[in-house]
Image: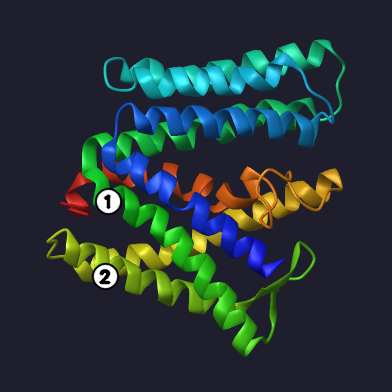
Amino acid sequence: MLKQRILSALILLPLPILALYYESPWFELLCAVALTAMGWEWEKLVLKRFTVLGMLIAVVGVACVFMLGDFPEVAWTLPAVMTVVLYIAVKKENTEHQKLFAFGMAYSVYPMVALAYMLQNYGFVCTIWLIGTVWAMDTGAYAFGKTIGGPKLCPKISPKKTWAGLIGGMATAAVWGLGCAKLDGLQNFGFVMIVSAVLAAVSQGGDLFESWIKRYLGVKDSGNLIPGHGGIFDRTDALLAVTPIVVLILAFFPELDFWG
């Protein structure tokens, strides 16, 4: 299993980095693939079957990413509107968990739009910093949790997570933030380290939230798309949680001089 996880990571890891570096149209293509997988996986996870409604998530998401530059108001508003539309459409079918399924629209699309916003307005290094913060948290939490062990963080939802893993992951993310800040020539690297550590904790919350959804639905993994890793939501749950928060900080609190 470990070899399979490492092999999958080595194959898949360069793709988002290259797509972010070369930007359009590769980033939009990456979003299209990711959102298509999310829509397919979400309807299988929640509805236990395939419908055209799952693909609506992909269509709306890709459209919003493309419209962000010229029509930002539409890109930020459309997912909320379509979440309501999706809820009504599923409700007419008398489908169980319709609220949760409709939530998948906002849950999937807004983070992708937010990621596009970061790339367009703050550049490659800032965007990679965010993604790397999540990876650093995941890696640090695994390493420290395995090595130290100790009290469980939230045993009823995710029995393997520990407080040592959380603290170790936050420290690892802080070091990663320092490296990115130095690379981009920022002077406020101390603040970036603090933000990285806080976001690492938030990303752990996103991981726990997705674990709660899976327990609620009675499944172990969100899917089996990625060998050794489960589904796409299993790999992106933390990123889905932190990306909109970072964009809100960058957009509405420029006085913090957070990045740049």
Q: Is residue 199 in view?
A: no
Task: Return the residue at label 2.
Answer: 178
Name the secondary structure under disc 1: helix
Q: How are the residues colored?
A: rainbow
Q: Is residue 24 left or right of residue 188?
A: right
Q: Relative to 242, is 47 above or below?
A: above
Q: Amino acid at mark 2?
A: Leu
Is residue 76 visible to us here?
yes
- Which residue is rendered at x = 37% and y = 64% of the image? 196
Tell me which numbered mark, 1 or 2, is placed earlier along the sequence: 1
Residue drawn at x 30%, y 69% is 193
Q: Amino acid at mark 1?
A: Cys
Give how far across and how far down residue 145 sits, in percent. Answer: 61, 80
Q: Is residue 41 left or right of residue 79?
A: right
Identify the residue position indicated by label 1 in the image: 126
What is the spatial separation of the Cα atoms under label 1 and label 2, in whole angstroms?
Answer: 12 Å
**At which x and y percent is residue 205?**
58, 58
Could you say whether the residue bearing mark 2 is in a helix, strand or loop?
Answer: helix
x, y percentage for residue 43?
A: 74, 29
- The answer to whether residue 213 is above or below residue 110 is below
Q: Quarter-wise, where is residue 171 in the image?
A: bottom left
Query: Which residue is at a point 62% across and 44% down the rendered structure image?
Result: 232
